[in-house]
Amino acid sequence: MGMSTGSNEEVILQTVKDKGVITLNRPKQLNTLNLSMVRKIYPMLKTWEADPRITMVLIKGVGEKAFCAGGDVKAITDSAKAGDYSYPFFGEEYVLNNTIGTLHIPYIALIDGITMGGGVGLSVHGSFRVATERSVFAMPEMAIGLFPDVGGGHFLPRLGGKLGLYLALTGYRLKGIDVQKAGVATHFVEAKMLDSLEKELLDLDDPGATDISKVLDHYHDQSKLDAEKEFHLQPHMEKINTLFAGDSMEQIFADLEADGSEWSLAQLAILKKMSPLSMKVAFRQLSEGATKSLQAELETEFRIGKHMLRNDDFHEGVRAVLVDKDNKPKWQHSCLEAVSPETVAKFFAPLPEAEELML
């Protein structure tokens, strides 16, 4: 093995033969992503991409619980509370997300374990995503008064039908093979095979995307666990595609209530716990993001994120879910009707030119 920052580092960067390997190394923190990690990964990715000898990049997390459970949002809110709205995490994270999405060499993410928020941004925009039976994928931002960022507005609408919007609004957790069946992962490989898979990938001689795909396909085909199971949401997909197709959040609420089925009312109860403001912002974000490039979407999300830093719901959501953990946030808007189109529009408003993210 070549370059390594050492096993005590938060992220370990190695060159193995002609491959780059990124290992997220904060298992006690579920490999959550922080600013210093972003600042190590990004320049290394650019170096590997510029090196004609490097044929692929593989990213994984230490431990069996998480690939990466998210970004360090508490540090962001702490910074904003202190009056510092310049916290650079969002911008630098999005630049990294964009680099992954535009990388000229194959990028393979082994999303074994919890993959949420920042972990989604480190994986979904790459060429290949490998889920295991331990994978748990979710975008739970509505519950903390945030929005599905890290390019969520780009990839979620592309999952087909209204599945992405449903996942964004409800924070529903996809588990195991469902992560692949939903289209979030490209492959499903049993966790016990990961070491063998990684070795075979790293042993490939000057591989291209086709060679990598053949190896991943082989392991996917050999993974029989849950292979015959129906996608867990399949029985509800017709309702998801119908009841989440409204032209506003108010319409979605009305359609769920009018349907009146046990499942629909259960979804309505979940949505009523979320930040009304976040839901309306996310609804517009995903509607517009369906036709945007990843770069354009990340630039929009940077605007939203900057405005969110100054928003009470984000701080209250982090308090309720991550700090005090009472799960009883007091949202600034009591219902959807209290959130005007003008209020939503403010989150999409351009920033001063010097502050904009330009990709």
Image (cartoon, rainbow, N blue to C red):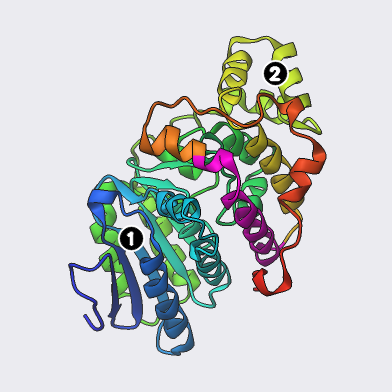
User: Looking at this rendering, what residue extends furthest in the front direction?
Assistant: 83
Q: Quadrant of residue 169 in the image?
A: top right
SS assignment at label 1: strand
In the rendered image, residue 235 lying in the magenta stretch gets the answer no
Question: In the displayed structure, does residue 56 sit left or right of residue 98?
Answer: left
The residue identified by callout 2 is 256
Q: Which of 31 and 308 is in front in this view?
A: 308
Q: x%, y% of residue 110?
A: 37, 57
Marks 1 and 2, how far apart at CA = 39 Å
In the rendered image, residue 311 lying in the magenta stretch gets the answer yes
The numbered dot on residue 60 is: 1
Q: x%, y% of residue 45?
A: 44, 77
User: Most prominent secondary structure in the magenta stretch?
Assistant: helix
Q: Relative to 155, say whether 293 is above or below.
A: below
Q: How crowded is mark 1: few (under 14 residues within 10 Å), some or many (20 or more)?
A: many
Q: Residue at x 56, y 31 (%)?
A: 170
Q: x%, y% of residue 225?
A: 33, 37
SS assignment at label 2: helix
**Disc with the residue nearer the chain's start (1 vs 2):** 1
User: Looking at this rendering, what residue extends furthest in the left direction?
Assistant: 7
Q: Quadrant of the C terminus?
A: bottom right
Q: In which quarter of the image is the N terminus?
A: bottom left
Is residue 91 something one can see in this rendering?
A: yes
Q: Relative to 62, say whether 4 is above or below.
A: below
Q: Relative to 325, say whether 218 is above or below.
A: below
Question: In the displayed structure, does residue 347 sit left or right of residue 321?
Answer: right
Q: How many numbered circles are shown?
A: 2
Q: Relative to 324, say whether 192 is above or below.
A: below
Disc 1 residue type (three-letter): Lys
Q: Which residue is drawn at 60% across and 50% down?
A: 310
Q: Residue at x 62, y 47 (%)?
A: 156
Q: Give the range drawn in magenta.
A: 293-315
